Image (cartoon, rainbow, N blue to C red):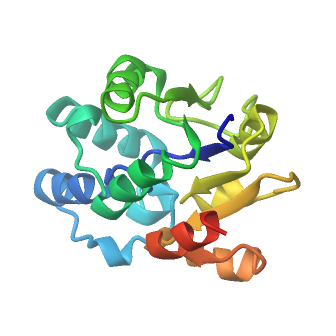
Amino acid sequence: MNKPLLASDIDGVLVDWMSPFIEHINTHFGHDLTYDLCHTHNLIDLLGCEKEDVFHMIDHFDEHFGRDQHPFIPEGYQALQELQNHYELVFITSRPMTYEPTTRELIAKHFGSEVIFAHGAKMKYGSKINRKRKFEIAEELGAVAHIEDNPHEFEGWNVSTKPLCHIQPWNKSLEETHPHIPRLSWSEIMKELKR
């Protein structure tokens, strides 16, 4: 019997990209940011910088820490390992295509799952232009649910795939913009998926 398909984001859900990034920009660029103060997923707004400056910080960070070196979120890693007993996993990420080989290798090593890149077609690091939303991809694949942390990915959610928002400081605004989509801890996500 085939398992149902479960879609999951990578960064902010399974992998902690933000903690090492915060440490890096505080050390190398003089910021004084803490994880709990990351009130938005938009780094331009969060850092109060121009887009080019943010891209420079990300590039500088990526030169020092490859995306395959970021730590797993322990609860996310454990939960997704356990969920593999009940679901077939697919990972949908908006990581830049330059990280495709290392991302596929990381996910294959730990989960043996497919990775789909929902990157922007025209802008570095993703864009809303010419880009399918992750929930649209999850729906096309037939996923029963999609685990995501980016509040912008929930805008216009109009598919039968169940939205599961992994709680992070940057998605607090979801409570106001999409009150029907609760922000959930990993233990709450597990309860939702075991029903």
Q: Residue 42, position in %: x, y? A: 52, 57
Question: Percent position (x, y) of residue 149?
Answer: 54, 60
Q: Which of 52 and 39 is in front in this view?
A: 39
Q: Which residue is farthest left?
A: 27
- For the point 72% across and 40% down, the residue is 138
**Residue sitting at x 38%, y 46%:** 54
The residue positioned 25% from the left and 59% from the top of the image is 19
Quadrant of the rendered image containing residue 119: top right
Question: Tag count in the figure?
Answer: 0
Which quadrant is the N terminus positioned in? top right
Vertical comparison of 77 with 47: above or below: above
Q: Name the residue nearer the viewer: 114 or 124.
A: 114
Instruction: Please state if 11 lies on the left or on the right of 171 as rendered.
Output: left
Q: Where does the C terminus fall, quadrant-wise?
A: bottom right
Q: Position of residue 32 (x, y in %)?
A: 21, 71
Q: Nearer the viewer, residue 175 or 124?
A: 175
